[in-house]
Amino acid sequence: MAGERRDPYRNFRFRIEVEGIQQAGFSEISGFDASLSVIEYREGNETITPRKLPGLAKYGNISLKWGVTDSMDMYNWMSESIQGKISRKTVTIIAINEEGGDVATWQVIEAWPSKYSAPSFKGTGNEVAIESLELAHEGMTRTK
């Protein structure tokens, strides 16, 4: 339909699927990005401006944050990694529209936990206790 309004998706409606792990209630996901290194190259007989060639693709680590519950799944994944049993998983990040439907997805491949942070506690505080996990990975694609 011509002229149909297409509003951008909201950043607070999302869910995450981690292969083999059932974890609900993530409060934040950040850091998923991709970039190409730039290699500058110049031969002696060329002009003073170097050529720019594409180098390696690099992917930023993804940070996941969630409120502490009785679920130990994400912590156990990290604990196994610390013990030398790296388990690479596919992670899917899904944006949800206002009607509750999946509208955009990013698939992260070969992800494994590289850093875990336990919550901070404060006797006079009233915030939710937050755990976080940083994931290293080898690629990301937008699949929808």
Image (cartoon, rainbow, N blue to C red):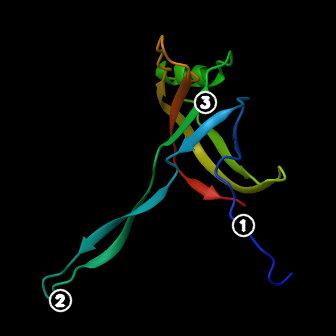
* Mark 3, other Cα within 10 Å: few <14 / some 14–19 / many ≥20: some
- For this orientation, the residue located farthest to the top is 123
Which-is-in-front pick, marks 3 and 1? 1
What SS does tag 2 mark? loop
For the residues labelled 3 and 1, the Cα–Cα distance comes to 28 Å
Q: Residue at x 55, y 25 (%)?
A: 130
- For this orientation, the residue located farthest to the left is 44
Amino acid found under the numbered disc labelled 3: Trp
Of the numbered discs 3 and 1, the one sitting upstream in the chain is: 1
* Quarter location, residue 10: bottom right
What SS does tag 1 mark? loop
Where is 73 relative to 27, above or below? above
* Quarter location, residue 18: top right
Q: Residue at x 72, y 61 (%)?
A: 144
- Tell me where residue 123 appears, x and y as whole percent: 48, 10
Where is 28 relative to 55, above or below? above
Of the numbered discs 2 and 3, the one sitting upstream in the chain is: 2
For the residues labelled 2 and 3, the Cα–Cα distance comes to 53 Å
Q: Residue at x 53, y 45 (%)?
A: 30
Amino acid found under the numbered disc labelled 2: Thr
Say which residue label 2 marks: 47
- Tell me where residue 136 appears, x and y as whole percent: 49, 40
For the residues labelled 1 and 2, the Cα–Cα distance comes to 47 Å
Q: Quadrant of the N terminus?
A: bottom right
* Mark 1, other Cα within 10 Å: few <14 / some 14–19 / many ≥20: few
| CB contact under 8 Å: marks 3 and 1 | no
Q: Which disc is residue 66 wearing?
A: 3
Please tell me how many numbered marks the rendered image carries: 3
Say which residue label 1 marks: 7
Of the numbered discs 1 and 2, the one sitting upstream in the chain is: 1
